[in-house]
Image: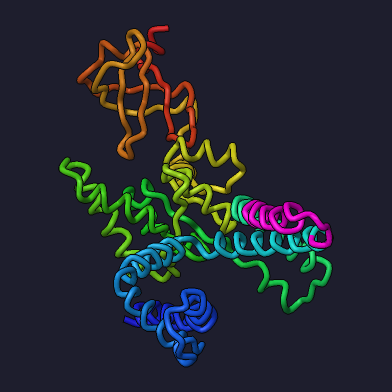
Amino acid sequence: MVLNKIVHLFFIISGGTIGFLYIPDIISLLDITDASWVASPYLGMVLGAIILFALSYLVTDYIVGFLRWIEEGLIKIPVGDLLFGSLGLIGGLVIAFLINIPLTDIDIYLVSQVLPLFITILLGYFGFQVGFRRRDELMNLLNFNRKERDKKQPTEEEAPERKQPKPKILDTSVIIDGRIADICQTNFLEGTIVIPQFVLGELQHIADSSDVLKRNRGRRGLDVLNRIQKELPVDVEIYEGDFDDIPEVDSKLIKLAKVMDGIVVTNDFNLNKVCDLQGVPILNINDLANAVKPVVLPGEELSVQVIKDGKEHNQGIAYLDDGTMIVVEEGHDYIGKKIEVLITSVLQTSAGRMIFAKPKLLEKAL
């Protein structure tokens, strides 16, 4: 392997250098021979190279394994995290260099030699941490400055090009729900559809579940994604990055939306609320479904089948054909019967629509 050869070459060069510099002195100190050619630096270079080359076979596998571990870790880090962390590290080292310049002139070993090394390590670490942990704020600042610059120099030809639709990030619940595919087919969603790798992992985990219901839901979600990617006229992007320091998928979605300046698409009521609190744009499929439902107004009459008890005393529960729940006051006595009801109020939220009604027979009796 190439990496093994590089490690062997490093040991050969290091051994030759060490042998050239130190082996003649060691032989002279030991005074084991009177021959001057034995103390030749070139012989020491050859001898040192041979010794370390032989030693490299004992440690090469461990060194290569360690380098592979570092390589895999770096590959998993998102490009934005790596970029801003590196920039922070460079900034910290530059500041440390400037601070250390006057310290080297002080004729105290602890101050001129040890303290600069400590400052370099400390500021390099702090610089990396600042760049890595504040990457979102730095990225938003760069985006803000770019938008402000574009506002100051508007042109008629470039104005439409700058207003690109924000990417739409799908969560697990909306993929399993399936209606997102039909919405994409109607071209109501503009911009790129982003499917994070950690969402795919959660779907795969659900599809491999031992529970039949969960397994079917997971496989349905994978089928929906396959349809979106292969059959529908939309741009689909798989986001390969991950946020290892965040365990929950919902929190990762919010983080990704902030990094990409995107919009989360979901039908999860709790995720909807968390996104609202954190100022992340969101598209709720339930809100869209409620918006296009036929409007039911208080005072209208409906014919419904009361099927079960309600939570409160003497209530009955019925459903419309689209699944909307109707709470029938004083409807307990009509369970199992089809009756005419009068709509009294309609409650519509992101979690769905709820209709309150009372039997028309009671209204006539009054």
User: Mainly helix, strand or loop, the magenta region?
Assistant: helix
Residue pictured at 35% horizontal, 74% vertical: 56
Q: Which coloring applies here? A: rainbow
Magenta stretch: give its range: 104-126
Residue pictured at 62% horizontal, 56% vertical: 128
Tell me residue 184's x, y (percent): 42, 61
Is 294 in front, or is 219?
219
State whether residue 78 is above or below residue 286. below
Residue 271, magenta (yes or no):
no
Residue pictured at 42% horizontal, 42% vertical: 248
State whether residue 219 is above or below residue 63. above
Toward the front, the furthest residue is 34
Report if residue 338 is visible in the image.
Answer: yes
Tell me residue 306's x, y (percent): 26, 22
| Number of numbered callouts drawn | 0
State whether residue 90 is above or below residue 23. above
Tell me residue 293's x, y (percent): 43, 43
Query: With 219 as the anchor, is 236 left or right in this view?
Result: right
Q: Quadrant of the C terminus?
A: top left
**Quadrant of the rendered image containing residue 343:** top left
Report if residue 136 is visible in the image.
Answer: no
Residue pictured at 49% horizontal, 32% vertical: 348
Is 38 in front, or is 347?
38
Q: Quadrant of the N terminus?
A: bottom left
Is 118 in front, or is 331?
118
